[in-house]
Amino acid sequence: MQALYDQLQVYLNMDEEISFKEFDDFYKKVVKELGDSHESFDEDMLWKALFIVENIMSNADERAKESKGSEAKKYRKIVQRLQLWAKNLGGRLGALGYNEEDVNERFNQMFEEGTPAQKG
């Protein structure tokens, strides 16, 4: 999951959008990793997995609005499929005592982690 988290941080800092094929390939890698390993995730990996899932969902939702035809349909399916993972991962963090405010705060920190250092 760490490698996927690192890759997501690269994507979040790119100026241009990746192609549908690259987006879909990344999504499929994430789903495979979740399916293979989610039961063994420690707390840190739960956070990273939820961050990845939420970012893919948000991006797919935006792309669905901008796309037409079968590509828009595929983006909507990605969102639908990841909603179950978001609930699973969010529920597990909730069981550890975190609430929505904690999630928002942690996600802000995770976005900052991926921000290139400003030259001063």
Image: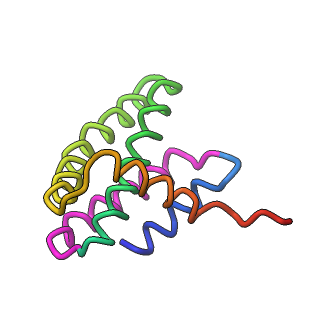
Q: Residue at x 17, y 59 (%)?
A: 92
| Number of numbered markers | 0
Could you say which is closer to the camera, residue 112 or residue 61?
Answer: 112
Q: Residue at x 43, y 39 (%)?
A: 58
Left or right position of 23 against 37: right
Q: Which residues are magenta?
A: 17-41
**Secondary structure character of the magenta stretch overall:** helix
Q: Where's residue 70, x and y in %? A: 39, 29
Q: Residue at x 24, y 42 (%)?
A: 83
Q: In the picture shown, does residue 71 fall above or below 102?
A: above
Picture quadrant where residue 13 is located: bottom right
Quadrant occupied by the C terminus: bottom right
Q: Where's residue 119, x and y in %? A: 83, 65
Residue placed farthest to the right in the image? 120
Q: Where's residue 89, x and y in %? A: 22, 56
Left or right position of 86 against 61: left
Q: In the picture shown, does residue 2 fall above or below 19?
A: below
Picture quadrant where residue 46 is located: bottom left
Q: Residue at x 43, y 48 (%)?
A: 55
Quadrant occupied by the N terminus: bottom left
Could you say which is closer to the camera, residue 70 or residue 27?
Answer: 27
Left or right position of 1 against 22: left
Q: In the picture shown, does residue 44 fall above or below 17?
A: below
Q: Is residue 98 magenta?
A: no
Q: Where's residue 54, x and y in %? A: 37, 47
Could you say which is closer to the camera, residue 93 or residue 71?
Answer: 93
Q: How is the image coloured?
A: rainbow
